[in-house]
Image (cartoon, grey):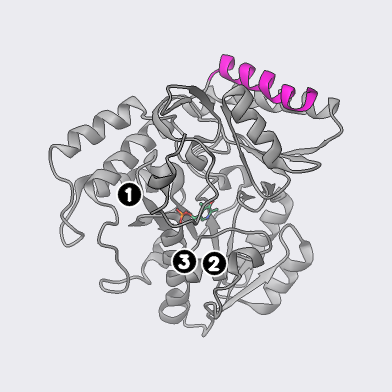
């Protein structure tokens, strides 16, 4: 249990569960009383390879004995290798490294404006984002986040954002009319309630961007790194982004973010236009490199296909039995279960009675985020627990 005199000094920006975690391995975590939990929250879609994945641990341990930090005034081999491997495994060409998702989106917003000014020279600056999106908590990324509850109390916001309805075809017409310099969109909205975009809508949006010289920028911070069943979610939507942003799963839990761009867009950043002291340092890029190798250079992504099917089929079966479940939605291992009533009641019960960790995505959506390294038995155990939440 948390010690109240110890938590007092931490600013209250999170409603924390009454649970103190001290150890993790694979799909499990342990609390300070030694109790074991099945963790299908994966540190908020971050520990995609499970907790303390061996290959990543080994690589980072080795790097810890060599060099921790030297700044971006010098060349960093692991940074170059990670950038190359990201480029090889995506349709993007160059990478800027930073420390978080919000910073990756900041970099995307900055490069979009600078591209409009220096490369396209079209005089545009507006960026369109979509209702229920989530792009981060810095002042500019919360200005990009089209959710009032995130923005409340922080006015004046950064100007230059326009919000349009997600998954709405009229919004695409408006994008064509407004001609912003860029749009920024999630393939599956994570924090906003696990809302997948339809493929038709996403492809039409991408096409409209292409026809009107609007940069098509995808926030893959939650959907990336295998979370939706492919390395990046955009692969399943068969679209060709100009920019993507990454963080969460990229470092297996070490803090790293990245903004990837096509070569002609990347040119808009020249030395001195953007930077980060820690961005892409030897430790975090070693972690990112080992993580990416595990996901992109092994059979992991094909191995998890039957596991994804098993989980979805099990959830849909449960949903068909209990009327309080309204919908099961998402993609791959990014799953939202919309319920009647408060999602928090179900996740509390899962934690307290069944030692199973899941989280919410808004007031009435349960969010399930298994590690990609889970197995048949764990999913079976999870489904048994999940049904009990509704049966009892
Ligand atoms: C988590 C998240 C962010 C913000 O990432 P931080 O690392 O918390 O700054 C941005 N966009 C999406 C889609 C996210 O899920």
> Mark 2 packing: few (<14 Cα in 10 Å), some, or many (20+)?
many
Q: CA distance from mark 3 to mark 2?
A: 6 Å
Which residue is at a point 60% across and 34% down the rendered structure image? Answer: 358
| Mark 3 and mark 2 residues within 8 Å of each other at the beta carbon | yes
Seen as rendered, the residue at the extreme top is 377
Q: Position of residue 38 (x, y in %)?
A: 53, 24
Residue, disc 1: 83
Specify whether tag 3 is near ligand 1 (CB below 8 Å).
yes
Closer to viewer: mark 1 or mark 3: 3
**Magenta residues (range):** 375-392
Q: Position of residue 129 (x, y in %)?
A: 62, 66
Which residue is at a point 48% across and 21% down the rendered structure image? Answer: 36
Residue, disc 2: 142
Seen as rendered, the residue at the extreme front is 5
Local SS, label 2: helix
Task: Give the side of residue 187 with respect to residue 279, left or right.
Answer: right
Seen as rendered, the residue at the extreme bottom is 123
């Amino acid at each position: 249990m948390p010690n109240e005199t110890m938590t007092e000094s931490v600013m209250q920006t999170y409603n924390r569960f009454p649970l103190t975690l001290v150890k993790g391995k694979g799909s499990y975590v342990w609390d300070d009383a030694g109790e074991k939990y099945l963790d299908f929250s994966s540190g908020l879609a971050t520990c995609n390879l499970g907790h303390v994945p061996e290959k990543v641990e080994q690589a980072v341990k080795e790097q810890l004995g060599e060099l921790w930090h030297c700044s971006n005034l010098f060349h960093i081999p692991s940074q170059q290798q990670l950038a190359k491997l990201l480029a090889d495994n995506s349709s993007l060409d160059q990478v800027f490294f930073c420390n978080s998702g919000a910073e990756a989106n900041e970099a995307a917003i900055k490069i979009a404006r600078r591209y409009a000014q220096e490369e396209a020279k079209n005089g545009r600056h507006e960026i369109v984002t979509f209702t229920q999106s989530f792009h981060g908590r810095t002042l500019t990324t919360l200005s990009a986040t089209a959710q009032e509850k995130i923005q409340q109390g922080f006015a004046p916001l950064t100007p230059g954002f326009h919000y349009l309805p997600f998954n709405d075809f009229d919004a695409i017409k408006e994008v064509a009319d407004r001609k912003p310099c860029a749009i920024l969109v999630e393939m599956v909205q994570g924090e906003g309630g696990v809302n997948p975009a339809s493929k038709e809508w996403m492809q039409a949006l991408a096409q409209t961007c292409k026809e009107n010289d609007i940069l098509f920028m995808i926030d893959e911070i939650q959907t990336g790194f295998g979370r939706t069943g492919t390395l990046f979610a955009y692969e399943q939507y068969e679209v060709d982004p100009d920019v993507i942003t990454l963080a969460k799963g990229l470092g297996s839990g070490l803090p790293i973010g990245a903004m990837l761009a096509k070569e002609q867009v990347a040119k808009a950043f020249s030395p001195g236009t953007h930077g980060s002291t820690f961005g892409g340092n030897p430790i975090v890029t070693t972690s990112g490199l080992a993580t990416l190798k595990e996901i992109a250079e092994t059979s992991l992504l094909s191995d998890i296909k039957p596991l994804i099917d098993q989980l979805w089929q099990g959830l849909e079966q449960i949903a068909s039995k209990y009327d309080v479940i309204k919908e099961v939605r998402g993609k791959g291992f990014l799953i939202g279960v919309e319920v009647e009533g408060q999602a928090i009641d179900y996740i509390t019960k899962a934690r307290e009675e069944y030692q199973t960790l899941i989280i919410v995505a808004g007031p009435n959506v349960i969010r399930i985020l298994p590690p990609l390294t889970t197995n048949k038995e764990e999913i079976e155990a999870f489904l048994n627990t999940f049904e009990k939440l509704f049966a009892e």
